[in-house]
Every structure is written in structure tokens, then in C-alpha cells.
Image (tube, rainbow, N blue to C red):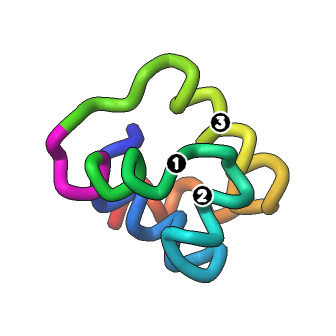
Amino acid sequence: MFNPRYIKKMADKVGGVHQLSVISDIQVSTLYRLLRGEVKPSFDTLEKLTKVIVDESLESNNENFINA
């Protein structure tokens, strides 16, 4: 579910990677590594990204993220 394209769309939706970092409490460098596909998200990171979806009301667009 949280592939690099999905994370990029999340970042775009909230105003960029730095803003996603601030909102999610995930280091910018970790987000960029995820975006480049260098690493897979840990369980903790998945929880934080999921919380952003709920907190930022992105879940209504969740299907659009997955199908993009």
C-alpha cells in the first residue's frame, strides 16, 4: 500500500516532503529513502503514515492514491 508513488502523492497533498515529515514525525531522510525505494517502511513508519491519512482527512481520497 505505501509504495513510493503513494508516499509521493501523500507528500504532495500535505505540501511537500518536509511538511509530511513534520506532520508524521518521520525524518525527512527516511521519507526520501522511501520515495527512492531504497527501504521499505517499518511498522512504526506505517503507523505514522496511516495516522497522517486519518488526521489530514486523506482517507477520503485513499482509493485515488491506491489506483494512481
Instruction: Tell me where residue 15 sits by quadrant.
Output: bottom right
- Residue shown at the point (71%, 50%) measured from the top left: 52
Residue 29 in the magenta stretch? The answer is no
Task: Tell me which numbered mark, 3 or 2, is placed earlier along the sequence.
Answer: 2
Instruction: Tell me where residue 20 sits by quadrant.
Output: bottom right
Q: Callout 2, which amino acid?
A: Ser
Q: Callout 1, which amino acid?
A: Gln
- Residue shown at the point (78%, 47%) measured from the top left: 54
Mark 2 and mark 1 in contact? Answer it, CB < 8 Å.
Answer: yes
Q: Looking at the rendered structure, which numbered label has been put on residue 48?
A: 3
Q: Tag 2, which secondary structure? A: helix
* Residue 19 position in % (x across, y down): 64, 71
- Residue shown at the point (53%, 64%) measured from the top left: 10
Q: Quadrant location of the C terminus?
A: bottom left
Q: Which residue is mark 2?
A: 21
Q: Quadrant location of the N terminus?
A: top left
Look at the image and give the residue range highlighted in magenta: 34-38
Task: Tell me which numbered mark, 1 or 3, is placed earlier along the sequence.
Answer: 1
